[in-house]
Amino acid sequence: MQGLNNLKYKAGTKHSIKRVGRGPASGHGKTSGRGNKGQNSRTGGGTRPGFEGGQNPLYRRLPKEKGFKNLLFKVSYIAVNLEDIIKIEKSEIKIQDMIDGGLVNKNERIKVLGSGDVNKAVTIEAHAFSKSAKEKIEKAGGKAVTCATI
């Protein structure tokens, strides 16, 4: 019977540690795999990350970012065409219906674009509408409802 007391690792998943400095027969004796002499062979030796042997390093060669970046407050929308939304056979199409229909993912802002024709009165809820989409919806007798929150 299998229990917590007799669980074992799969063969080949666990390796024994590399024991360095334990004589020439181990294969990692004498210099312990560090080579002969030099900065990297010493205790506490080595260089900092990004050091290029005194050459001007990459992080100093590249130009600095200048100007204002509005990435923190940028609002991005997922574009959905009217022709795709109309395929959802409902008179009132909400954001959740678009998520369930696979048009968008959860927690994404939706902008409805005017590609396609509307032939029936439909109420569509989204975060933003293009001018042409709004006109087509209202021309067919429907409503374009703007939802502010995600």
Image (tube, grey):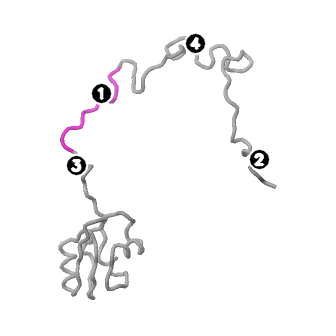
Name the kind of residue labelled 3 in the image. Answer: Asn
Question: Which residue matches tag 4?
Answer: 36
First in sequence: mark 3 or mark 4? 4
Question: Which residue matches tag 3?
Answer: 70
Tag 2 near tag 1, CB within 8 Å? no
Q: Which residues are magenta?
A: 55-68
Question: Which residue matches tag 2?
Answer: 5
Name the kind of residue labelled 4 in the image. Answer: Asn
Nearer mark to the viewer, of 1 and 3:
3
First in sequence: mark 2 or mark 4? 2
Name the kind of residue labelled 2 in the image. Answer: Asn
Marks 1/3: CA distance? Answer: 25 Å
Tag 3 near tag 4, CB within 8 Å? no
Question: Which residue matches tag 1?
Answer: 60
Q: Is residue 45 left or right of residue 92?
A: right
Is the magenta region chiefly helix, strand or loop? loop
Q: Is residue 2 left or right of residue 16?
A: right
Marks 3/4: CA distance? Answer: 52 Å
First in sequence: mark 1 or mark 4? 4
Q: Is residue 90 magenta?
A: no
